[in-house]
Amino acid sequence: MDWSEYVASRAEGRNQEEIALRVGVSQSSISRWKAGEGKPSAESVMRFARAVGDSPIVGLLAAGFL
């Protein structure tokens, strides 16, 4: 699973605006990640994983940092 697939699967059915607030990015950033546009920083990846209830390691693996 790559980063965009991970974001799409974990954000599905959740309030995207709330996730963006927890991660500290704009809602459009979440949309771009889902579309496979751009790669976030490792810090943002870890915050996203925590925001959706995952271990940061899961996000880092999906984003290709590990």
Image (cartoon, rainbow, N blue to C red):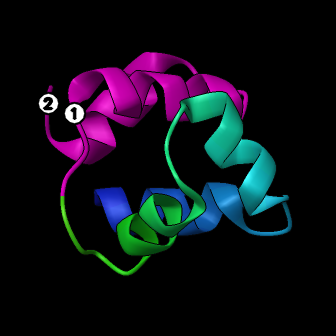
Dot 2 amino acid type: Phe
Residue visible at 68% across and 59% down in the picture: 11
The reply to whether residue 1 is in sight is: no
Q: Position of residue 10 (x, y in %)?
A: 65, 55
Q: Please tell me whether mark 2 sits on a helix, a strand or a loop.
A: loop
Asked if residue 25 is positioned above or below residue 29 in the image, the reply reads above
* Closer to the camera in the image, 34 or 25: 25
Residue with the most extreme left position: 65
Residue visible at 63% across and 46% down in the picture: 20
Q: Earlier in the sequence, mark 1 or mark 2?
A: 1
Asked if residue 28 is positioned above or below residue 43 in the image, the reply reads below
Q: Position of residue 29 (x, y in %)?
A: 43, 60
Residue 61, located in which quarter of the rendered image? top left
Residue 19, located in which quarter of the rendered image? top right
Residue, disc 2: 65
Residue, disc 1: 41
- Secondary structure, magenta segment, majority class: helix
Residue visible at 56% across and 32% down in the picture: 23
25 sits to left or right of 60: right
Residue with the most extreme front position: 26
The reply to whether the magenta stretch includes residue 60 is yes
Q: Position of residue 8 (x, y in %)?
A: 55, 69
C-alpha distance separating marks 1 and 2: 9 Å
Decide: few, some or many residues near mark 1? Use Cα within 10 Å; few <14, some 14-19, many ≥20.
few
Q: Quadrant of the N terminus?
A: bottom left
Dot 1 amino acid type: Ser
Q: Position of residue 31 (x, y in %)?
A: 50, 73
* Closer to the camera in the image, 36 or 23: 23
Decide: few, some or many residues near mark 2? Use Cα within 10 Å; few <14, some 14-19, many ≥20.
few
Q: What's drawn in magenta, residue-wise?
A: 39-66
